[in-house]
Image (cartoon, rainbow, N blue to C red):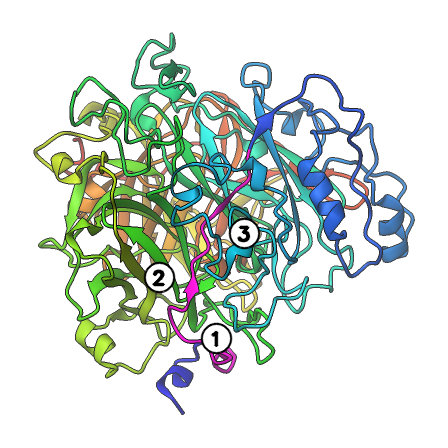
Amino acid sequence: MSPAMAQDIPTGAPPSPLFGAQPFTQKMMMFEEFGTRVVPTVPNAGSGPFAAPSNCQSGPQAFQVDKMIKQVLWPLPMRMSRTDMPNPWAAKVGYCIGQTLQTSSIEGRPTGELYAHQRFDEFAPKVYFSSVQTGSRANTGARDTMQRHKYAAGEFGPGGLYFNTTGEDSGSDGTTKGIKVKFHRNFPEQNKNSVWTFDGTMPPKLLMARYGEPILFRHYNGLPIDVSANNGFGMHTITTHEHNGHNPAESDGFAAAYFYPGQYYDYRWPMTLAGTDSINTGATDNWAGMPNGVGGIKKVRGDWHETMSTHWFHDHMLDFTAQNVYKGNAAMMNYYSAIDRGNEGLSCRSQNQSNPNLCLPSGTALDWGNRDYDVNLVVADKAWNAAGQLFFNIFNLDGFLGDQVLVNWTWKPYLDVRARRYRFRILDGSVSRYFKIALVTATGERVPFYLIANDGNIMEHSVAFPNEQSQDLPTMGIAERMDIVVDFSQFAAGTKLYFVNTMEHTNGAGPKGVVPMDQILSGAYQGDPAVGKFMEFRVQPYAGTDLSMDPAMFTEGHLPMIKRPAITLAELNGAKRRKFEFGRGGGTDGSPWTIKTDNNPLIERTGLVENAGLPDGTTAGGGLAADMKRVSTGMDSGLMEVWSLQNNSGGWNHPVHIHFEEGRILSRDGRAPPVWERWARKDVYRIGPGVDSSATVEVALRFREFLGTFMEHCHNTQHEDHSMLLRWDIIHPGETVAVPTPEGGWEGTFWEPSYVLPGWRNGSGIAPAPGAAQ
């Protein structure tokens, strides 16, 4: 038995066949932009409802999907969920499930005021995009004209590195037409129920968004009506979380607010800065703004210190997040602002400190959002069966590990890069795998780079690597993002460089440790098959002038990039404190992962205190399994809180995600965080015994502007689904009753009473972290 099989990687399956493919022989797919359009003000006569599929086991035909993508938005969005039109698939649904629907709705958003869009008139959507979640199919090029570059500008134009989208032949010049859902040209095409993506196509998708321009995302569910038509995994009901937008609860992707095939859900993302009600309320600060399209800035309200950059959105279906995200329900999202505008050719901060524009590597052809030298990378492990179809083990609850690493859904790709600076926005898009990424030459020498963003936030100061604390990129937990700047000008044209994963796993508990580079490159290491080179860079000549910022000018002791929002010691001492313990106590075989809140394992329902949520025979003191009707904590809008995230699950690791707001890590195990977290704001927090982690993390957060129901969970999504997930609410001061919980069905939303933990408003009274104010 090989070491990989002994380690059970891929989880519960034999090694994934490679069908004769060789590493670094396939060009990496660059993200395809969704493209946004202006929200219409009157109904469009040429648009119409979503045509039903021909059978119960398939989604709609390709031309029907393209029609929904390209047609003008219809019907118009409303503040409350539309109930005046039926699900256009209602008749087909009735036939497939053997029950005539008595009622149905075209929109799957829960009905009534509780899920009405908050402050809808104030943040009315100005632009929109539509996409159909559906089975894999060949790309028809339907979005070619929606690309901001339109395959006519910069490196995406004729003669540019990325004008040819596949590296195969001239047939893919200036178009994505013909690209199939294949991880390598040697591999079989994925069938329609093996992979479910936005549009059903590859390349993976990217949303380009600007602060101050509210967005409507009309997400159509085009998945099979038959729940079993999924090739062994995946759920046909979905809900979409924009990770980690400052969005109201009804558009946050609450796990119980899912919708059904044939329906759509209108997510409205306000694209407003946090603090918009209390800071810079007159929109007078030049640093808080959006690119206006003609070289200037349109000012917006809010705190520019809260500016975010690299996001993603993904499914959050209750109990099925891991399966649905792994299957393809994930896309990336770039925020553009006065500070991070995606144009390196305008006046830059490094030249004039009164200018907000950082001039991060990007390009100059467009006013904002150039992607010539700004590249999104989603890194994720996958596995496939003997027929080459995507495989997932639904029975392993500890964590699923694939044996092959894909970048942008491409197996061990190469990417042509110019001999100049690049920005890479790296996302760990795995289900359970952590990565530690090194950038090396062919002989193993480390290539220097700078970390400039951690999760969705540009840091106060860039951090050079290698450094005294780490040679390579810090450990990346699931859903973490790290933006780095690499200068390829130090290498001659023709040079090849490599991303190498050095983090070993033996099971889903978390990373085992770092494998020495010499053992990896020599071939001496024969363990985890996902350890090793997974991406190649090929340096090409550059005849232009690199106008991007030098990140060395923004290291500690030099210029700041985005100063973190100020926190005073008085605020910390007055902050309400809460404690969350992530572990296995109190769980069941089917739901082993639990969270204990503020030392309180009891819940209160209809006036009775009971061990509800705990299995028979479980003693008080254990954690609680997920229950979307239970409110674990309720906090008042506008106040600072300090949350203590603690791991009490032995050798297990948990990347904990807190929805809605970014946090400042105050301490790790009572000590100052490492330099790459000290200058950062984050939304994913690694706890556990792994490298670059700790047993306890103290986080300071503020919750502002919007109310409603949000979540906190482990982003090892197998843990989240079984069932390391809790609900918390932002409520009006003095409110004592939790809002009801929506549950969907083919015939509409019904509401369940919610209940609360005793002391849900009080917190735990943890002492403040020493030396935390900065």
Q: In the image, which is nearer the foreground, mark 3 or mark 1?
A: 1
User: Residue 191, percent across and down?
Assistant: 66, 66
Check disc 3 and give the amino acid type.
Ala
Q: Which mark is residue 626?
A: 3
Given residues 319 and 264, the one toward you in this image is 264
Q: Secondary structure at mark 2?
A: loop
Spatial CA distance of label 3 from label 1 is: 25 Å
Asked if residue 124 is among those painted magenta in the image, a careful observer would answer no
Circle 2 sits on which residue?
434
N-terminal label among 2 and 1: 1
Tell me the quarter of the image containing the N terminus.
bottom left
Q: Could you tell me which residue is drawn at 50 percent across and 30 percent down?
A: 247
Check disc 2 and give the amino acid type.
Tyr
Image quadrant assignment for residue 154: top left
- Predominant secondary structure, magenta span: loop
User: Residue 201, percent across and down?
Assistant: 60, 53
Spatial CA distance of label 2 from label 1 is: 15 Å
N-terminal label among 3 and 1: 1
Q: Is residue 35 visible?
A: yes
Task: Look at the image and give the residue range highlighted in magenta.
Answer: 11-35
Q: Could you tell me which residue is drawn at 57 percent across and 21 percent down?
A: 126
Q: Secondary structure at mark 3?
A: loop
